[in-house]
Amino acid sequence: MLNRYLGSALGLAVLLAGSAMATTPALPPEYSAFRLAYRMSYFGFDVCGDTADGKLYRKALAEKVEHCPFTPAAKADFRRWSVEADIFGAADVQRYIAEHDKLPERLDEKRVACRKEQATPAYQKTIALLAGYGKGEVPYDAVVPDACDTKAGGP
């Protein structure tokens, strides 16, 4: 699931350069993949008009981080960072769209392909898991089954 959002990391970095999300100090490598997936979820869900599922995914991801064997300080740092990401992430995307009337070319193409992606079995499975998670019927680790030591850009 984390890898779903890792492919567009460079596009996100370009879009958010200079923002609070891009200037936040780097997290320890052991959970940088979780931070990257959190950021990319705005483009996997929100940009495609699926903000509610994006919020559920980010909630499950944050819950996963809380259950991983990271230090209390690392978990607190992720919590602080995620609040900042939620404040600035969607706002940065919306501001860019308002200023340019579209996303950057490589991301605008992604938005055009949303319907195709949303029709895939993998996306539908994710949406079903998020619906169950939202009802309290599916645990966070079913939504985010990745190991706690998943590395950004890993397989």
Image: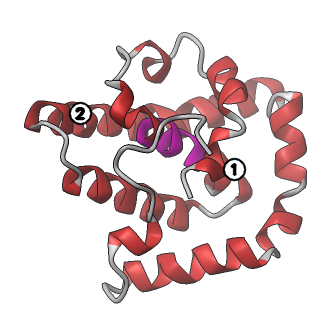
SS state under label 1: helix
80 part of magenta stretch: no
Q: Nearer the viewer, residue 88 or 129?
A: 129
The answer to whether 68 appears left or right of 34 in the picture is left
Q: Is residue 101 above or below residue 3?
A: above
The answer to whether 78 appears left or right of 56 in the picture is left
Expressed as whole percent of the image width and height from the top left, the position of residue 77 reads 21, 30
- Measuring 59% from the left and 73% from the top, which residue is drawn there? 126
Q: Quadrant of residue 119?
A: bottom right
**Magenta span: chief secondary structure:** helix
Q: Which residue is mark 2?
A: 80
The answer to whether 144 appears left or right of 109 in the picture is left
Q: Is residue 89 above or below residue 131?
A: above
Q: Which residue is mark 1?
A: 47
Discs 2, 1 touching: Cβ within 8 Å: no
Expressed as whole percent of the image width and height from the top left, the position of residue 98 reads 73, 31
> Which region of the structure is painted magenta?
34-42
Locate the C terminus and report the quarter of the image it occupies: top right
Q: Is residue 76 visible?
A: yes
Type of amino acid under label 1: Val
Q: Is residue 109 above or below residue 32?
A: below
Locate the N terminus and report the quarter of the image it occupies: bottom right
The answer to whether 123 appears left or right of 107 in the picture is left
Label 1 neighbour load within 10 Å: few <14, some 14-19, many 20+: many
Q: Is residue 102 visible?
A: no
Q: Quadrant of residue 138?
A: bottom left
SS state under label 2: helix
